[in-house]
Amino acid sequence: MLVKVSASNFRSINKKQTFSMEAGKARNFSERTTRIAGTKILKFKAVYGPNASGKSNLIRIFEFMRTAVIRGLPGSSTMDYCRLQDNNINERSKFEIEVVLDGKYYEYGFEALLSEGRFTREWLIEHKPQSTRQIYYRNIEQETFEIQDFHNAAINERLRIYADDIKADKKVLFLRAMNQNKASLYTENSKISLFQTLYQWFRDCLSVHYPDDPLTEYTYFFDSMGCAAAEEILKKMDTGISGVSIYDVPTEKVMSQIPKDLFQEIVNRLTEQKAQNSDSDEPPAVVVRNMEGHDMFMIELRDDDVACRTLKFKHQHSNSLFTLRDESDGTVRLLDLVEILLSDADNTVYVLDEINRCLHPMITKQFVKYFLQLAKERNIQLIVTTHETDLMDLGLLRQDEIGFVEKQETDGSSRIFGLEDFGARFDKKIRSAYMKGQYYAVPRLDAIK
């Protein structure tokens, strides 16, 4: 689970700023926190702030770290240093994340000179109640590498060889290198499985999404239990949808709406999946969605034939069937978000920018209520940015579940802080106080003359 993330010299963030999911002193709703490795961790946080304050850049920290670990520095990141100060072009940018994995508390981080597109340092540390243990430290500029002794000569030697292979490589992180064609390494050597576990957390458990970015592939609708659960949520959210059905679609129709090269790439990928999972009874499938028209199709490989299906929706007061294209932007947005409520994968961290986009305030609040109920039973985390002040209710959220980002007057950089910093009482009407500027992080508007 996520504990903290921090960054410096990144976009609107100048000096180091830290976003924390560590629980504070609040005592209410303790059933939706969890204590692991001696740390009490939150499962939800709503982040507020005016436009252009840096809320989206907080989201981008997560995306940037995930991309850097899995694929390397993005090619567009050479301009991602904090350009509010000219000398930052030559300063290192620093990224750190603290997570609890398999009951142990780790800090992973790296530095990069973004303007030149290269990594400069990388490290991994285990935090224990009374001490810390450096697992490895890599100074890429000096081409030095320190790694702990795993008390196994063969493992130690292999790790040194892997480290030497990338000692001077400024484009790749050691964590990534340790997960390229090395699956058998961890099967044989469980002592170093942390390198695989941490990498897989970035790849599989950190889910980052922007307002126009579909959160889901709608695969839950193609499962009978998932479909029934989704239908129930859609009914309770007053979308007008009373039923969801699956229909076959001629392959020719799908091919007419998808570029030929993309369709062939999908078929090739499904063929590979079938070969790799020959023992599975489930046919390999992928969901394709057209963002402009919201058309959505599931493409399957049944035996050696390609088959396509789509969803159609029944409404309460009509006998007609409607496609995703026919639904409102708000309903489509809600369909995207339902994935969070239906997923059974523990330890996933969902990070969403503008959760309330296209949604009525009451729908947004109801969705958060559903999630908070779910969080009592599961180790799942949801971090959202929002302008929806109806969530600012201490009868709904803890003080430490409300955070802020503001643009500092001194240099225009972003500052990250939380409601707990103000010592707000549990019975205070914080929405009104926030709108009056008592917690800052609101627009500074000039009067209209």
Image: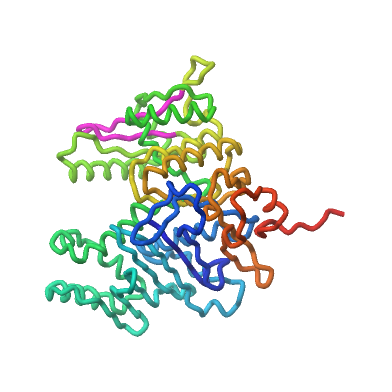
* Residue 330, quarter of the rendered image: top right
Image coordinates of residue 90 in percent, x first then y, are 51, 80
**Is 121 on the left-hand or right-hand side of 151?**
right
Can residue 287 be spotted in the picture? Answer: yes
**Is 172 on the left-hand or right-hand side of 448?**
left
Instruction: State the residue in front, 304 or 181.
Output: 181
Task: Say if 419 sits above or below 211 in the image.
Answer: below
**Image point (39%, 64%), residue name:** 98
Q: Which colour scheme is used?
A: rainbow
**Image point (48%, 29%), residue name:** 234
Instruction: State the residue in front, 229 or 128.
Output: 128
Residue 243 part of the magenta segment: no
* Residue 73, quarter of the rendered image: bottom left
Can residue 124 be spotted in the picture? Answer: no
Task: Say if 311 sits above or below 78 in the image.
Answer: above
Image coordinates of residue 299 in percent, x first then y, are 33, 35
Task: Say if 54 sits above or below 340 in the image.
Answer: below
The total of numbered circles placed on residues is 0
**Image point (31%, 61%), residue name:** 198
Residue extending farthest top: 319
Residue extending farthest right: 449
Residue 310 part of the magenta segment: yes
- For the stretch drawn in magenta, the main secondary structure is strand
Which region is colored magenta? Answer: 296-313
**Is 261 on the left-hand or right-hand side of 294?**
left
Image coordinates of residue 272 in percent, x first then y, are 22, 45
Q: In which quarter of the image is the C terminus?
A: bottom right
Q: In which quarter of the image is the N terminus?
A: bottom left
Image coordinates of residue 407 in percent, x first then y, are 64, 64
Instruction: State the residue in front, 263 or 167.
Output: 167
